[in-house]
Image (cartoon, rainbow, N blue to C red):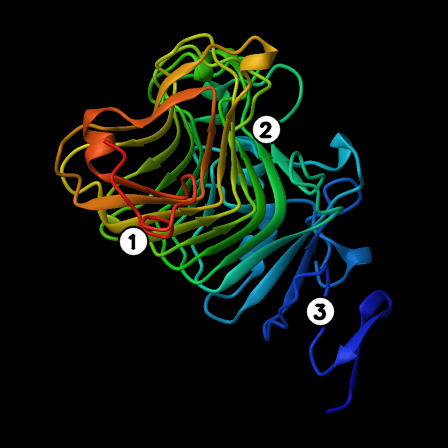
Amino acid sequence: MGLTNFPDGISSFGIPIVGGAGIAFTGKYWFVDPANGSDGNTGKSPSKAFQTLYKAHAAAVAGRNDVVYLIGNGAASGTARLSTALAQTVDSTATAGTLNWTKNATHLIGICAPSSTGQRARIAPPTGVYTQSTFGSGNFVVVTGSGCMFQNISLYHGFSTGGTNQICWTDNGSRNAYINVNFGGMGDDASAQNTGSRSLKIGSGGSGENYFYQCTVGLDTVTRTVANASLEFAGATPRNRFVECVFPFQTSAAGVLGIIGTGNGCMDRYQLFERCSFINNISSTSTAMTVLTTLSTASPGGLILHKDSTLVGIGEFGGTNGLANSYVDGGAPTAASTGIAVNPS
């Protein structure tokens, strides 16, 4: 296989590999540089990068394993902004700033230091006075594509004035992979005080089988005051797997939740949490949470399995229905029970 010379000095044998993804994709490569790019550019090299994610997604072709690289500059000035006005520069019919990731096998990778919180390949609303009402929707990013990979990016979903049912990231696709992604939902007082707000919502019509590795779900810079949830399972979503993920909390109410499922059939088969940490900052003025998980019915359609999960400042793995449908493995070692998952109720 011959040497491929990619623009701007990036080379590999056969297929370009950029940004530490560790996977050689076979499609086209699109670059977004919010600080220095322009949507009038070709987007095909770092020096000719687009400015917006809307433009890059529009340029990508579904099913081809195209990759969008989001270039950070190490500061907030390199943030990719989402707004109604920017969305309309690419699609004049857009009525909201929601980034709709609709294309299968289309990937998004951040080029920045792989810190676990607030990575500087970052997505957020405009600075200054910019409200959820102006944005036009409570949904920030909605994924309906399947077979996509998202890596080394962070999201901050906070407005100067937020609103109700504010959801940072919704995944209604299937078999998507998330590696070192920070889902920073409820980043303003209004959304942190609304029961419909979420940092991450998964599932629609049986979609699921997603993988989350070393992700951070939520933020702890805004105090949550009501029974909203960092993560929601919906639409009979099956077989989602979380590995070494962190769920941070800052609360002033005991009813704040980590995980919620509403209605019969909100999930299917299992939801697996391996070596995940649910950290409520009780040594930094946060109020202790009563339970991690609430399920509105006794028959949610699936179970939750925790393998070596850790709860800090949270009293129980779940309420009545949450406990009845949760299994926990990883207690104190004993010859008879180590490695055998048991219902904690």
**At 47% across and 10% down in the image, what residue appears?**
287
- The disc, 3 or 2, on the residue closer to the chain's N-terminal end is 3
The secondary structure type at the circle numbered 1 is: loop
Please indicate whether residue 72 sits to the left or right of residue 337 in the image. Answer: right
Asked which secondary structure carries label 2, the reply is loop
Label 1: few (<14), some (14–19) or many (≥20) C-alpha neighbours in 10 Å: many
Residue drawn at point x = 45 percent, y = 43 percent: 308
Q: In 3D space, how far apart are the residues under numbered discs 1 and 2 (Cα atoms)?
A: 28 Å
| Position in image of residue 136 (x %, y %) | 44, 26
Q: Nearer the viewer, residue 132 or 331?
A: 331
Q: Is residue 39 above or below residue 116?
A: below
- The residue where tag 1 is placed is 207
Residue drawn at (65%, 40%) of the image: 116
Specify the amino acid type for callout 2.
Pro
| Amino acid type at image mark 3 | Ile
Task: Give the residue type that dot 1 points to.
Answer: Ser
Disc 2 crowd rating (10 Å Cα; few below 14, some 14-19, many 20+) is: many
Residue receiving disc 3: 17
Q: Which residue is mark 2?
A: 125
